[in-house]
Amino acid sequence: MLWRELMDTIKAIKLSKGRTKRFQIRLLSGFRFSLEPDVAIKDGLKVGQELSETQITRLIGADRLHCCYSAALKFLSYRNRSEAEMKKRLGERGFDTENINAVVSKLKEQGLIDDYVFAQFWQSNRETFSPRSRWLTKLELRQKGITDDIIDLVIENQDDNDNAYRAAVSQAAHLPSDEYSFQRRLSGYLRRRGFDYDVIRRTVRRVWQEESNLTTNKQV
């Protein structure tokens, strides 16, 4: 006698209230589960329809994958993400490794996740709004899971002297007017952005001289 899979029947389908809209599915056996509208509509579920255990398992799995993909798109709506960063965030949301890998692979195929593009975006953003050293930029990208070969390509033209100067100029107007306090605080500021001693020394001397000349010209 051939084995026959147990069947169950949909007793009720109800759309949940509130911000998160999901179809609540109740079976004659008393078993309940919920699905994203897209998943339920795709399968054309209706009251009275028979479902096998395999079909129920497949529906629940498809729903979980759909939720994982939706969460990934939401993360990307805020800013670009590296592959490692996306996997970490989805893991923190409680999604399993299989779904996470499937979603990340799909996003990569769609061009929505690209570690080289992400690294370029990150480096460019830092250069524009918060200049820092090559060393610190490299450290930040490593923390985002970017490989060294990509990092080296992205930061190869980054100039520490230029970045240190631009960072220092942006801070100069907020610093004390006496030389000792000015140089001490500016040096600390540049150290926190990863610049080495020689770059800091040259930059602080240059910016202090420019500020001094500017003050002198105003007084004349």
Image (cartoon, rainbow, N blue to C red):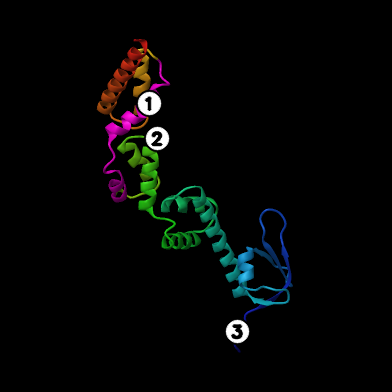
In percent of width and height, residue 119 lies at 37, 48
In the displayed structure, 211 sits above or below 57; it is above
Q: Name the residue under label 2.
A: 130
In this rendering, position of residue 18 left or right of residue 168: right
Quarter of the image where the C terminus is located: top left
Distance between mark 2 and mark 1 Cα atoms = 12 Å
**Callout 1 amino acid:** Tyr
In percent of width and height, residue 118 lies at 39, 50
Residue 28 in which image quadrant: bottom right
Dominant SS of magenta comes to helix
Q: Which of marks 1 and 3 is in front?
A: 1
Q: Mark 1 points at which residue?
A: 189
Instruction: Please tell me whether residue 157 belongs to the stretch shown in magenta.
Output: yes
Q: Do the residues labelled 1 and 3 touch (CB within 8 Å)?
A: no
Distance between mark 2 and mark 3 Cα atoms = 67 Å
In percent of width and height, residue 211 lies at 34, 18
* Camera-nearest residue between 123 and 143: 123
Q: Residue at x 36, y 38 (%)?
A: 127
Q: Residue 3 carries which label?
A: 3
**Callout 2 amino acid:** Ser
Residue 133 in which image quadrant: top left
Instruction: Count neighbours of disc 3 (C-alpha within 10 A) and say few if under 14, some if 14 to 19, many if 20 or more.
Output: few
Q: Which mark is residue 201?
A: none
In the displayed structure, 78 sits above or below 189; it is below
* Camera-nearest residue between 141 and 158: 158
Residue extent of the magenta highlight: 149-176
Secondary structure beneath disc 1? helix
